[in-house]
Each structure stands twice: as structure tokens, then as C-alpha cells.
Image: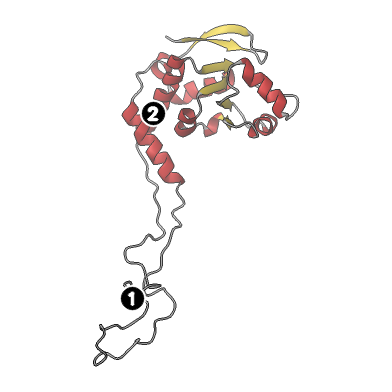
Amino acid sequence: MPKVSVYNIEGDPVEEIELRDDIFGVEPEPAVLHEVVVMQLANRRRGTHDTKTRAEVSGGGRKPWRQKGTGRARHGSIRSPIWRGGGIVFGPHPRDYGYRVPKKVRRLALKSALAGKVREGNLVVLDEFRLSEPKTKEALRVLSRFGAAGGALVVAAEPDPVVKSAVTNIQGVKFLPVGNLNLYDLLRYPKLLITRAALARVEEVLK
């Protein structure tokens, strides 16, 4: 069963806790990680791209020249797809790219990502993450104590506008309440700083 130290905001270890082996000790599944990340990115696509067909392009109501006798090819509209400025054939139109994978697969992907953080030594558990003021300098000072100033995902049990404001301007750092924890952000940021209360919530949901 994996064990990790719990640190205070000053960077000092205060105790050691055991993590659930069925969550943080699983063997990472790269194929599952890929499947869920692709799903998550597909669901983020707006799908508002659109091209006009020959029926939607303005103009072209009159036949450009008579059918016979000119020596030129027959045409009925200057908005035909073969004309410059004409309609687009088989172009993209608004659509929904979203789809779902089974809940068990999504949970296995989260477990795989969390287990990977533990194996790489990139999981840091804090007793709490609170700042007196929403100052970037203060947030950087805390993150640097854990080697996370260059890139980290900070997860707390509840939304905290002070911490969120403090880390917003730090490149490569993002704050999330545990209810918004997702696979893409877990894989995107190298370090995971999570409060003990948020960790308990994760174990409760994924057990």
C-alpha cells in the first residue's frame, strides 16, 4: 500500500498516511488514458465551423450565358462549386463531436493517472492550502518549496477564490476544486498538489 507524507504550507512533513492500493497502486493503462483524453478533447470542441453550399452562396440566380451556340461549356450558375467564389462541396457544417465512454473506463483512467503521479514522486499532499492574500508572489513561494513552481495542478476540496487568483498569473499552474478534477489536467501538469480533504474526497469517489 503506497505511503506519502503530508506537508504543511511551510514545506515541513507533519505525518505519513497510507493511500488506497486499489486507486494509487494500480498498473497504469496507457490505452485507457488515451481513450479518455481523446473523448475529453472531443467534448470540448465547439463544432461551429460552417461552409456554404451552392444553395447558400449569394448570387448566381441568372444563367451566365445561353445553353448553346457560344462554344463554351454549359453553365447554369456562377455559384457552381467549379467556379471561383462558388459553393463548397462536402465542406464542414455545425455538428456535435461529443461522445461518452463507460464510467468504469473513465474511473480506471483517473486511477491510472493518479497511480502514475505516485510512482513518479509527483504527488504532494498538503494538510491545507490557504493564502492570506491573493498575491502571486506568495503563491510562488509556497509552490517553490515543493518544486512545483514550473508546473503544477493545485487541487482543493472547495473552490478558493484567493488561491485561484494568486496562481492564475503563474504560467503552467492551475487551481481546481476537487469536483472539477479531470484526466486531461492531471496529465498536462507534471506535479499534483492536493489537500488532504480533497484526497479523501477522491478516494471516496473512486473506491
Residue visible at 24% across and 91% down? 68
Q: Residue at x 41, y 64 (%)?
A: 51
Left or right: 104 with respect to 129?
left
Disc on res. 13? none
Residue 109's disc number = 2
Q: Residue at x 43, y 41 (%)?
A: 41
User: Which quadrant is the C terminus positioned in?
Assistant: top left
**Which quadrant of the structure image shows residue 90?**
bottom left
Of badges 2 and 1, nearer the viewer stands 1
The type of residue carrying mark 1 is Ser
Circle 2 crowding by C-alpha within 10 Å: few under 14, some 14–19, many from 20: many
Residue closest to the eye, 74 or 188: 74
Q: Which mark sits nearer the N-terminus, 2 or 1?
A: 1
Label 1: which residue? 80
Q: How many angstroms separate mark 2 from mark 1 (CA)?
A: 49 Å
**Disc 2 residue type?**
Ala
